Every structure is written in C-alpha cells, then in structure tokens.
Amino acid sequence: MSTEGTWYVGLDLGSQEHEVAVCDERGEHVGRFKIPRGMSGRRLLHDEVGKVVPPGDRAVYLVEAAGNFWQEIVHPLDAAGEEVCLLSPVKCSDLRKFYRRHTKTDAIDALATARVGVSDHDLRRAWVGTSEQESLRRLCRLAWKLSQESRNHKRRVSALLELVLPGIGKVWRNRYCASARLFYRRYLDPARARRLGRKRLGEVLRRRAWGKFSEQALAKLWAVIENAPELRYRYDDLMLEVQCELDGLEAIEQRRQVLLERIEELYSEVDPTHRLESIPGLGGFLGAAFTSAIGDVGRWRGADQLVAASGLVPRKKASSGREKANQQLTKQGDPMLRCWLYVAAELARHYDPELQAFYLRLTRRGLHHKAAICAVGTKLLRRMYAILRDGVDYRVLAEERIRNKEKPVRESVHEVAQALLRDQPDTASPKPSYPAQQPAARTALAGSGTLSVD
C-alpha cells in the first residue's frame, strides 16, 4: 500500500485525549502531538498533520478499532474524504510487544500504530455507512446483547427452579409462558401449592393460560410438587430471588421489543425490498442484522473476502510444500457476525433441502455438527453476498419437489435432501462451468452452480 509521498498517522485513543504519531513511508518518526476529544481535537489534528505532511502528499490515518472512541475520529475524517484504515487490535498489540519489553507510553503506542501501515500492505479502508445504516448496525448489536442477557436470566431462574422442584422443566413446553411465570411467582413453595390444592391450582393456571393448560400438564406439575425435596432454605427468600430475576427478564423483553420495532423501520429504509428475508428460515431481525453487517456490498472485492472477514474459515498452515489439514477457524473479524451466521445456518438447513443435503454430506464424512454448521454458514454468507450484489431474491432449489409450497416443513425438506443425496453421491460438490451470463440475467437459485458468486 505504501507509495512515494505516503505518510502514516497513527492514533492511540484515550478517554481524555488522543496521542498522535506521524511517520514516513520508511517508518521514520517525524512528529507527534496530542489532541483533545471532540470537534476541537479534529481541527487540531487537521492543522498539525498539515504542518508535517507536505501539500499534495498522501496521508493515511491508522486507528485501532477498539471501544467506541474510534468512531469520533473515523466518521468526520471519512466525511472529509480522508483515507482512514481501521486496524485489528491483534495486529497493533503484536507490533507493540517489542516496545513494551523496555517501556510503555502512549507516544510509543501511537508510533507503533503508525508503523503498521509500513509493514502491512493489505490495509482496508474504513467504511462508514449512512446514518440509517450505522443506526441499524448499532441497534441490531444491542438487541442481540439484550437477548443474551435474557438467556442469562433464564438460566439462573431454571437453576433455582430445578433446585426447589426437580423435573419442573418438563411440565411446560415453554418454560416462560404466562401460566409458568404465574406459578413461579406465587406457588414455588411446595407447601403453599399443596395448601392451595390440585384442583384450585389447575383452575388458576388454566385461567391464566386461557384454557390451554391441560390435565396432563397439571398431573405432571402435581407429581413434581409431591416429589419436592425438603430444603433448609426460607422459601419466601427463594421466591423473592426468582421474582427479581423474572422482573429483570420482563424488563429486558420490553426494551428488546421496542428495539425490534425500530430495527424494522430502519431495515425498511436501508433495504425496502428486504432481500435477505427471502432466504427460508431468516426473519426480520436476522435479515436486518446481516444487511447491517455486510453494508455496502461494493466495498468487498468478492465473496471470499467477506467470508474471510467473518472468521469462519480455517487457518492456513503450510511448510515445504505440504499443507496441514484440519486447522482451527481463524475467528477474525466481528464475533457477533459469526453468532448470527451460526444461528442462520441452523435455521436455513431446516428449510432449504440443498443446504440440508450439504450438511448431511459433511456429517456422514465424520465432521462434527458444529463444524458442519460453520460450513453451512459460509455457504449461506456467499449466497447473501450474491443476493445483495445482483439485487435478486433467494429461490430454493427443487422447489417443485416440496409438498407444502407456502411454508416448507422439516419433514418435506428432509425428504428432498435425501433425494438430492441419492442423485448426488457423497462427494465434494464441484464447481461446474457455465456459459457467461449478463448481469441482468443472473438468478439467485439455491443450487451450488446456479447462484453466481465471486
């Protein structure tokens, strides 16, 4: 990336002020200074860099993508047309290790960040989307974090419930439905439930469940109550603990519902056609999440670069012309994108027969379930890239072989996948050659050869 007349500006970000170091294309330190946060710091950065970098030369700003402070630097610089590159924290820390053996200062950290541009010739310019795209990205991440917090509340509640009433998790299909939450709040004490009586308890729960609490479920629940162990705890305090956890869970669910409504509005503004929702199994949230993570599809050189950025690719390890197989995933890039891909692959393989056939081929070769799901996720990400690049919808392969055309069910998808496996034996899917097509004639079929992917 280094050319004649290139200057690298490294920034070490801080909560109060930022340290800035400038070096030339050979890595020689030519200047350093500090700037405050905010707009005043942005103006000072422009003035000080102008004093060091000669007019007409190229200045490359290098910022470590850690925390949230980098956004107040990258956004205005990108809006001003400056060349800004976001660096992986791993690259910056590895280069700083040598300096830290002797001393560690903000000036040295800023200089090490600037020298990354001298040694790394594969820097990628930072991408900043529109205000709607940036808001969509942040809200999707926040909604996902809230869902993780809600799962943590549910784990703690489940642990308390199994402590007091072993086997209660098998009574309700949904452990956190309205009738289940009512029971947890009021009748978690077995003695209190026995005093109420089986008949009266069934009426209370049935009324809360709008008549959908069956006698079989009541019989299971009463057997659990009768089998409850005697614990040397104050059950009022245990119920208070459960109530606090449920209050926190319900508050998170309410906030997340507000976020999902706003995400739906932003998603309609960013992509009015909701292209990614055409993938079977993907709902509105995952469609919006992947749209925000991929961003402008033109910023990727191809699907390979996008997949590599997701971190769901194995490491490369070769020596003396021999490549070692079965390497671990790189796990570089956004970890939240990998979580979304894993969930999307789990869902899509139950609705797309070609993806399920691909999954079955991998597991029959002895690949672990999680490794096979990661492979399905990379294939799905390539198809997302092609959908957004070509502006077409996703269409399932062998759609006419699915009995229920409106909403494919798991049984029919499994049958189609088995038929595909019989037609295509357990071999690696080759990349067949097809005649060149015009961009307007591309179609997003789910077959491995009919979806055009770079």
Image (spheres, grey):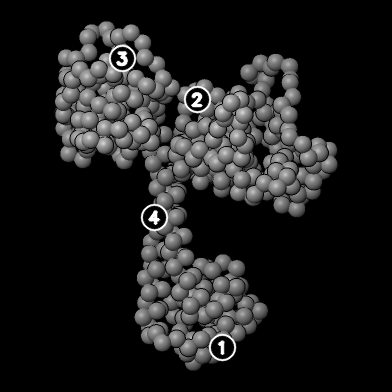
> Residue 52: x and y, percent?
19, 15
Q: Are marks 4 and 2 in contact (CB under 8 Å)?
A: no
Q: Quadrant of the N terminus?
A: top left
Q: Secondary structure at mark 1?
A: helix
**How many angstroms separate mark 1 from mark 3 (CA)?**
77 Å
Tag on residue 25? 3
Q: Is residue 21 above or below residue 189?
A: above
Q: Secondary structure at mark 2?
A: loop
Q: Which residue is mark 2?
A: 300
The answer to which quarter of the image holds residue 9 is top left
The answer to which quarter of the image holds residue 263 is top left
> Residue 155: x and y, percent?
47, 65
Horizontal placement of 293 versus 72: left or right? right
The mark that comes first in sequence, 1 or 4, is 1
Q: Amino acid at mark 3?
A: Glu
Q: Amino acid at mark 1?
A: Glu
**How many angstroms separate mark 1 from mark 2 (CA)?**
62 Å
Tag on residue 8? none
The mark that comes first in sequence, 1 or 2, is 1
**How many angstroms separate mark 4 from mark 2 (CA)?**
34 Å
Q: Which residue shows up at 36% across the image and 29% down it?
A: 86
Q: Amino acid at mark 2?
A: Trp
How crowded pointer 2 is (Cα within 10 Å; few <14, some 14-19, many 20+) is rated as some
Q: Which residue is mark 1?
A: 226
The mark that comes first in sequence, 3 or 2, is 3
**How many angstroms separate mark 3 from mark 4 (CA)?**
49 Å
Q: Which residue is mark 4?
A: 255
Residue 71 visible? The answer is no
Residue 98 visible? The answer is yes
The mark that comes first in sequence, 4 or 2, is 4
